[in-house]
Image (cartoon, rainbow, N blue to C red):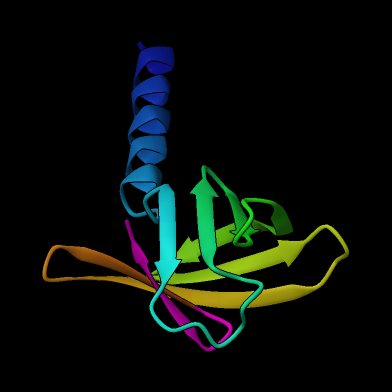
């Protein structure tokens, strides 16, 4: 009985963590400050910057997502933060002074 209870608590914890995570998908920039970076693809806990030719030019791992604030770490050890929110049925991501909208 204790094993089943522990399993249920673990399952509930995992489900609640995914319920508050940023949705996966493609996010397109609203303004084109940087011509090399035109989109962000989020897949699970990985954030990819994609250029106009469709090539991945940067990869960030999402370390945590707390109240809409993403803690990111690159393969080179650099760290950064990004924010995301939902408004009027749309999902927005703000990273590096650029706002992206989920497509």
Q: Is residue 3 magenta?
A: no
In x, y percent, where is residue 54?
A: 62, 51
Q: Which part of the image, by quadrant, shows the N terminus? A: top left
Q: Residue at x 32, y 34 (%)?
A: 12
| Residue at the front extreme of this rendering | 53
Nearest the camera: 63 or 48? 48
Principal secondary structure, stretch drawn in magenta:
strand
User: Magenta segment range?
Assistant: 95-103
Nearest the camera: 100 or 37? 37
In x, y percent, where is residue 79?
A: 74, 74
In x, y percent, where is residue 37?
A: 61, 71
In x, y percent, where is residue 50?
A: 62, 58
Q: In this picture, is 32 found above or below 20? A: below
Q: Residue at x 44, y 14 (%)?
A: 3
In the image, taking residue 67 as reference, residue 37 lies left or right, namely: right
Q: Is residue 97 magenta?
A: yes
The image quarter containing residue 99 is bottom left
Q: In this picture, is 24 found above or below 30? A: above
Nearest the camera: 2 or 96? 96
């Amino acid at each position: 009985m204790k094993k089943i209870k522990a399993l249920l608590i673990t399952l509930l914890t995992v489900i609640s963590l995914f319920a508050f995570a940023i949705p996966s998908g493609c996010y397109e920039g609203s303004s084109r400050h940087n011509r090399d970076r035109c989109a962000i693809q989020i897949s699970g806990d990985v954030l990819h910057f994609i250029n106009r030719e469709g090539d991945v030019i940067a990869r960030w791992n999402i370390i945590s997502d707390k109240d809409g604030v993403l803690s990111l770490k690159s393969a080179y050890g650099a760290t950064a933060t990004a924010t995301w929110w939902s408004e009027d049925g749309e999902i927005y991501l703000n990273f590096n002074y650029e706002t992206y909208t989920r497509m």
